[in-house]
Amino acid sequence: MANLMSGSYSYEELKKKYDDFEIPVVKVKVNGIDVVSTMNLPVVEMKMTLSMDAASMVVLKIGDQYDLKSHSFQAKVKNEFSIGTVVEVEVGYKSSTLNLFKGFVAALGMEYSELPLIVVTLMDARRLMMLAGNQVVLHDVKNYSDVFHTIMSRYSRLCSTEVDPTSDNLVNPLSQTQDDYQFVTRELIGSGRADREFFVLGKTAYFRKPHKEKTAIMTIEFGRELLALKTDEWYRDLNIEVVGYDADQQTTVNGKASVHTPVLMKKLIGNTPEYYVTDPSMDTVSKAKDKANSIADKLEYKAKTGQGMTIGIPEIVPGRYLSVKSMDKDLCDHKYYLKTVIHEINGTDYKTMFDIEGWES
């Protein structure tokens, strides 16, 4: 699992690993046992949505489980996927699979069009954080990363943690009145207190520095594994200034940064617009500067968007970069940051789709 956040691969290496990308395979494990093979379950369709910004989910559609005489689905299958069951999912090809998801059965239902199907919806720990209800807690810790450790310990059945520590030296306890997900994403990260990304992949919840791993998963090419790509880079021209307060010196402190403009852009107004952020907790120039840089970086990345599709490649996951070459050096040949990745298997057809937010030239 650790390789998914640091590994780099060549197309030839993966082609050999997956036997020319033939015969897609889905493994669905309950208590470590692949119930697809042991119970001979035909997975008609599998759609896995892995996201940096929301709870990841897997939708499984299982066929051949309906008894026309008794007018019911097989009881053993319904029991195996009882709501709340912890499930892991691996995808790949007959020769090799990767564990990309661990979560719980959030919904169990059926679908009937041409054939009656059992539909199992799995969601990761972030969904459980949303369902846990508002928490009224005072976190008496020194750093925001300590708060994250405390919160995620409640969800240890679904994930472990990998954390980049913060150095905040908090003086007062931190009050929480929201559910765990809103508190982490809004109060810690969204407010700018903690310059971190929070996402879950496989068995691990990450609280790490944004865009941390700069190495690309692989370099993809049109006419080979890359099937489609669309990119847009939007107009931007902005300076950021964060204003804080040094209580010891009783003076304001300032940190500045600029959002980088596109190479192919003409300015429309003479003076670059200024965006001011006031945050008394930024009590040193260094902290204010770091926050300004963080805001500028996020705005720049959000102004670079796109979507793409490849043949099914399990190693393509969010939170990593994916390189494209030999297309156009200004518009296409970049190292793209992946925010959402969808792995979809229908019978013998396996495709990987992805959403882009930001890139490095």
Image (cartoon, rainbow, N blue to C red):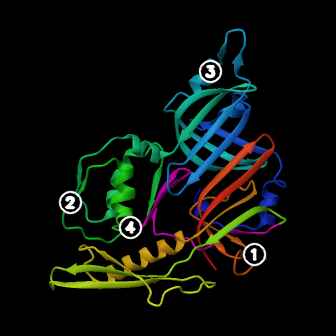
Foreground pick, 270 / 305 = 270
Q: Residue at x 30, y 85 (%)?
A: 254
Dot 1 or dot 2, earlier in sequence = 2
Q: Quadrant of the C terminus?
A: bottom right
Residue occupied by mark 1: 325
Disc 1 residue type?
Lys
Q: Quadrant of the N terminus?
A: bottom right
Q: On screen, 133 above or below 1?
A: above
Q: Nearer the viewer, mark 4 or mark 2?
A: 2
Indicate the position of residue 20 as horizontal and vertical percent values: 84, 55
Dot 3 or dot 1, earlier in sequence = 3
The answer to whether marks 3 and 1 mark residues whose Cβ atoms lie closer than 8 Å is: no
Disc 3 residue type?
Lys
SS state under label 1 = loop
Residue 173 badge: 2
Residue occupied by mark 3: 76
The answer to whether marks 4 and 1 mark residues whose Cβ atoms lie closer than 8 Å is: no
SS state under label 3 = helix
Residue occupied by mark 4: 165
How far separated are the C-alphas under marks 4 and 1?
35 Å
How far separated are the C-alphas under marks 3 and 1?
50 Å
